[in-house]
Amino acid sequence: MYVCICARVRECELRAVIRDGARDEEAVGDACGAGTGCGSCLDRIGDLIAEETRTDTLAA
C-alpha cells in the first residue's frame, strides 16, 4: 500500500528505511523522498516511525 503518493513510496519501503535508522520525518524524506511533496502523509510516516521504534525497543 502506498503511504506517499507524491513520491510513490510504499509502506514496506518506509518500514525498511525506518529500520535502517531514519528516526524522524526529515530523515525518512532524505532516505526515500516520502513526505517531501504535499505533506499529507506526514502523520502516517510519524505513526510508522513510532510503531517501528516501539518494536525495536520491545525486541531489545
Image (cartoon, rainbow, N blue to C red):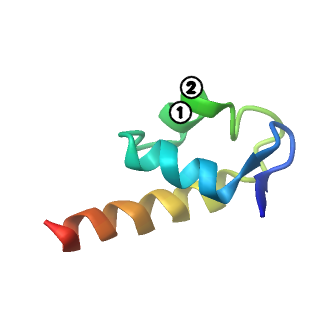
Q: What amino acid type is highlighted by mark number 2?
A: Asp
Q: Estimate the x, y position of residue 43 in percent, counting from the top left.
A: 64, 59
Callout 1: helix, strand or loop?
Answer: helix
Q: CA distance from mark 1 to mark 2?
A: 6 Å
Q: Residue at x 56, y 25 (%)?
A: 30
| Depth check, front residue: 43 or 32 | 32
Kindly check if marks 1 and 2 are in contact, taking CB atoms under 8 A apart as contact.
yes
Q: Which quarter of the rendering shows the C terminus?
A: bottom left
Residue depicted at x 21% and y 74%: 58
Residue at left 50%, top 42%? Answer: 17
Q: Pointer 1: what residue? A: 26
Most foreground residue, 50 or 52: 52
* Image position of 5 (left or right of 15): right
Residue 9: give x, y in percent of width and height.
74, 45
Residue at (33% x, 60% y) in the render: 53
Q: Is residue 14 above or below residue 7?
A: below
Q: Which mark is residue 57?
A: none
Structural crowding at the residue carrying mark 1, measured as other residues with C-alpha within 10 Å and reported as few (<14), some (14–19) or many (≥20): some
The number of callouts visible is 2
What residue would you read off at disc 2? 30
Left or right side of 58 for 12: right
Front of the two marks 1 and 2: 2
| Amino acid tagged 1 | Glu
Extreme-top residue of the structure:
30
On the image, the x and y values in percent for residue 40 come to 79, 52
Q: Tell me the quadrant of the picture where the N terminus can be found.
A: bottom right
In the image: residue 50, left or right of residue 59:
right
Image check: 33 left or right of 5? left
Closest to the observer, 39 or 33: 33
- Dot 2, how many residues are within 10 Å of its Cα: few (below 14), some (14-19), or many (20+)? few
